[in-house]
Every structure is written in structure tokens, then in C-alpha cells.
Amino acid sequence: MNNNIQKYFMNDIYLGIYNNLIKLTRNKNLYNLNKQDTFYDRMIILFFHLGFLLKIHKNIETKDNLQKFFDYCVRQIELSIREIGYGDQTINKKMKEYVNLLFSVIDNINTWELKSNDEKKQIFANYVNSSTNVVIYIDYFEKYRNFLTKNSFKNLSKDIITL
């Protein structure tokens, strides 16, 4: 397969996986029903989905492939911020904040399997509205982690109906 065809093939895979992450992020059960979910709330949930995906597949996929997917996701997030209508200076500031937040999430879930439920609750409590029952997130993301371990990276580009 020549490089141009392979590049477009991988971009299609990245688009499929990213769209599935967005679809999972839109799960209304993940948001506190007492308040309107915000762009920030959705970004946090997206970052947990992305973080677990990268964590599970870091020893399976090539570093180059995961780096390209990560870069693709960051570009898509930037496009989403632009669609909201922010100016260039605000976009740069927001992107810096969001990328730092994503790295913070990734850092916090790096040793997820070794953490107690109380430690996991605290991680979610640090990122989501404190009035939300964070146990819901622990159960949900344990199922999501299990799902990720049973599916190849490329298989994640296929349509995901539910976990």
C-alpha cells in the first residue's frame, strides 16, 4: 500500500475511533441530571475515554500510530473550539488548558489497576461536579476498559452502539 493510500486509510480509522469516542462521551447517563452538561463536562469525559484507550493500547499499537491518533484528536478538539466561535488567542489559551487537563487525566489513570476504589473516586471527584455520584464513573469506565482490552485499535473504528 503506498504512503498516500495508507495515510487516508489511517485517517479514516482515526475518524471512526474519534467519532466513537464522541458517541460514548454523549452518553446522557454520564452527566448529572440536575444540571446542564457543558462543553467542559464533555471534554472531561472525552479525556477519560481517550486516556483509557491510549493506556490500554500503548503496548499493543505502535507508538507512531498512537501519536498520530493523539495528534488527530487534539486537532479535532481545536476545530470544536473554533466552531464555538472563540478567537485565535482564546483558542491557543483553551488548547493549552485542555491539553494540560488531558495529560493530567492520563497521568491519574496510569496506574488505575493498582488504585483502590476510594482513590478512583477521588480522581473523578477532582474532575467532575462534586454533586455527581462518582461511583457511576468507576463502574462505567471499568466496563469501558474491559471493552478496550477485547477490541483491537482498528476494530474501535467500527460503529459502537453501546458498551
Image: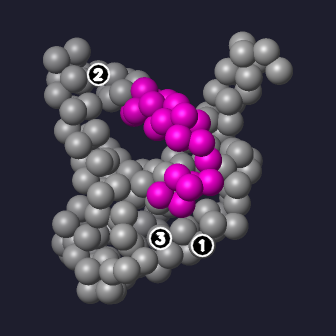
Residue 119 position in % (x across, y down): 26, 80
Residue 18 position in % (x across, y down): 56, 41
Q: Which residue: 26% across, 31% down?
A: 95
Q: Amino acid at mark 1?
A: Asn
Q: Quadrant of the C terminus?
A: bottom right
**Between residues 30 and 112, which one lies in front from this camera angle?**
112
Q: CA distance from mark 2 to mark 3?
A: 32 Å
Q: Which residue is mark 1?
A: 146
Q: Amino acid at mark 3?
A: Phe
Residue 84 position in % (x across, y down): 32, 27
Q: Is residue 15 above or below residue 103?
A: above
Earlier in the chain: of badge 2 and badge 3, it is: 2
> Which residue lies most toward the right here?
1
Report the magenta residues as a range. Answer: 55-77
Q: Which residue: 43% across, 27% down?
A: 75
Q: CA distance from mark 1 to mark 2?
A: 37 Å
- Residue 51 falls in which quadrant of the image? bottom left
Q: Which residue is mark 3?
A: 141
Q: Which residue: 19% across, 66% down?
A: 126
Q: Residues within 10 Å of mark 1 (few under 14, many from 20)?
A: few
Residue 154 position in % (x across, y down): 71, 45
Q: Residues within 10 Å of mark 3 (few under 14, many from 20)?
A: some
